[in-house]
DNA sequence: GATGAATGAGTTTTCATTCAT
DNA sequence: GATGAATGAAAACTCATTCAT
């Protein structure tokens, strides 16, 4: 929103969105390298060349699709999480939402968990930027708040962020690649329990 | 494991190993798609065509390289872990070794954390096989043992496996992509503390 | 010359001229193949599509631009040359004007000397027409007159035309490509001297 | 000859030459931009990709073809011209050879006169190098020698070079584009006469 | 078995041209 | 007439794979 230098008409915007939607679909199913621009174009009901009116190249289309996705997800999360009173509740809510979103949209889960990393030099191209940064730093802020609020003990926020994001990411990957063969909700609850109470005998 | 149909002479075996070694090197540095067979061949000091005497295709070379790697790592781990007496010690040792191995060989860390996933349809082609499966199931067995031994509480072993592997995987990815800018050892200790004791106020 | 089938209003004519002017500019700087219609349109302050209301295609635009240019140049030359009394003076004046025009407008020199030839099949498409024909035949007529007037000896007019045009053309090309590094005027005087007196020892 | 870093086998050399020959043929008939690599490959009886084993890209193929051509022509010229005793004879011989070579190989004449200039940024890419330089400086040296030998009067050698090369170049262009409709030999004699004696009445 | 020259399928991207508004 | 968004044909180039030597 407001990222484009040129103002786009409603019609153009919807065309751009159609392309992004198609791109996520195709990237999710085929991965970056096997995804063909012509396939995305067909799915979006536009000509191949039209894609290049809105995006500089294939790589840029992937990044744009990703950016829009993360932004949308964060907007949705922020508004829902804001309703929670305590930091711990917000943190718990975040995990619920994270799981919920991807349960409803497995293609997006797959896209974020796997295909995104297939972009050439994804990490090399964005060494400091790291496109997931915003999402990750959002997690860290929730953790810091919860510590301040004294609802979780004073642990290293970065360490917990790594645990939360890494666990979620891999959980999603497993669930995606195993064709949703297990209950994401169940698994989530068990994981939250472990992170909450630890593994030690009381 | 009877993987090779034909018995290979020592000379051939060393040639095959040279290719695998070169493949890991090149895949690690360039990723699957940007890695060139000719580059691997040059590094292994063989002709391009020779690679096809030992491997069916590029994909197969990746998988073979990966298999060999995981196997080597597990062999090393098993022998060292066997010396530990309790399951909990073995589990702790595993995490130490996991971090230690990748600290010493960042290229391999990068290979496993990132490049491996760039294989086209990696997960689709090997849905049941899942190349990480052996490694992951090794973790799960360690956990089950520790529970039996009553040194950790009776939690869902799959859930903890997801936490352990996911956290480790993401930690590695971050460390690799951020050019080893933070201490892996330090972070590991903090993470282990959280997983051991949980995040709740005592 | 009745080139345009439809009568154009003044407004349209100025629009057409603006396009031609922009076309010469862009063709001169980028050459035929690298010149973009959209660039010409922007420079002429019209929409891309508008160009196709006045010209059939890119090739046609080049030819039209060229035609206009040659016509303008010849009109200017004729009026100035008409003031000279003898054929030899007219001939000398022509060479002066030729050099003068391109000295003042190097982009046009470049256009005529180099870019014009980059049109696909320029010579195949217009075998008899030869777009330079008018300009060249003007030279030849000046020569024939000078011979009749007995101010130059009775030589083959076509041969001298080839010498004059070829020498001028190459001189221009050299001067254009060498970024005007030498004095066109100086060189012209030396060339005229040689053509006038020959190379033989007296 | 000896330009390539890697030594090529006879077989490879003949393949490379076949490609160059085909390239000159195709470039001559279609011009640089309309010439298709696939067409050149077909004519040379090799696969498209094979061309890229010997040349970096299309532009490079054009330049290589050109270089080889000029070199071959100069070698032939030098050996034949060396037999002439006086500088003036050598100079005259040069013009004879120049015309003779292109009379026998019109495609090459066309290539050098027209298509060569269609390479993108031909002059911009080789501002100082100017690939025709060697040929042109050869002409200039012949002229300087003739002046020293006192067989032509002491004129500006650069100016005469421009006249000779420019005239020859345009003569060739005319002859090529007009499908050899006039006698090159005849025209040459007339031109030489004019340059020798000048245009003035004795 | 080993070689590496040769192959040719495959895909992004450009941009002249069109046509609905 | 004018616009400019949309079109889609076209082609250079790469590189995994093959196979004659």
Image: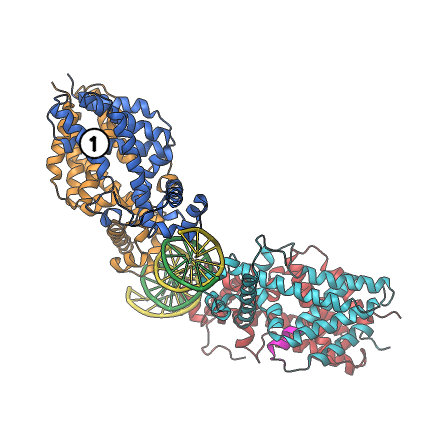
Chain colours: A cyan, B red, C blue, D orange, E green, F yellow
Q: How many marks?
A: 1
Q: Is residue B188 visible?
A: no
Q: Is residue A175 visible?
A: yes
Does C85 sit above or below residue C51? above
Q: Position of residue D106 (x, y in %)?
A: 18, 46
Q: Is residue A177 magenta?
A: yes
Direction from residue B19 to residue B137 in the image, left or right? right
Direction from residue B152 to residue D168 in the image, left or right? left
Q: Is residue B181 magenta?
A: no
Q: Position of residue C128 (x, y in %)?
A: 19, 46
Name the residue: 30% across, 45% down. Answer: C63
Q: Position of residue F6 (x, y in %)?
A: 46, 62
Of residues D190 and B85, the one drawn nearer to the viewer in this rendering: D190
> SS for tag 1?
helix
Direction from residue A78 to residue C99 in the image, left or right? left
Of residues C129 and C167, the one drawn nearer to the viewer in this rendering: C129
Task: Classify the position of the N terminus of chain A by image quarter.
Answer: bottom right
Q: Which residues are magenta?
A: A172-180
Q: Mark 1: few, some, or many residues within 10 Å (few <14, many ≥20)?
A: many
Does D83 sit above or below residue D72? above
What secondary structure characterizes most of the magenta part?
helix
Q: Position of residue B161 (x, y in %)?
A: 70, 76
Q: Which residue is mark 1?
A: C139
Direction from residue C198 to residue A186 in the image, left or right? right
**Chain on which label 1 sits:** C
């Amino acid at each position: 929103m407001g990222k484009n230098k040129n103002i786009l008409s409603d019609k153009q915007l919807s065309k751009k969105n159609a392309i992004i939607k198609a791109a996520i679909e195709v990237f999710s199913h085929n991965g970056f390298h096997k995804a063909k621009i012509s396939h995305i174009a067909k799915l979006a009901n536009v000509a191949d060349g039209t894609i290049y009116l809105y995006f500089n190249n294939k790589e840029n289309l992937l990044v744009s699709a990703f950016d829009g996705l993360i932004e949308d997800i964060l907007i949705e999360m922020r508004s829902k999480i804001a309703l929670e009173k305590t930091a711990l509740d917000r943190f718990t809510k975040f995990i619920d939402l994270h799981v919920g979103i991807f349960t409803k949209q497995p293609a997006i889960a797959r896209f974020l968990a796997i295909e995104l990393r297939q972009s050439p030099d994804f990490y090399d191209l964005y060494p400091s930027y790291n496109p997931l940064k915003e999402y990750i730093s959002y997690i860290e802020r929730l953790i810091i708040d919860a510590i301040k609020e004294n609802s979780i003990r004073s642990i290293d926020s970065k360490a917990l962020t790594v645990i939360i994001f890494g666990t979620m990411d891999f959980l999603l990957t497993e669930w995606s690649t195993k064709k949703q063969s297990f209950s994401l909700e169940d698994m989530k609850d068990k994981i939250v329990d472990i992170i909450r109470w630890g593994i030690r005998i009381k």
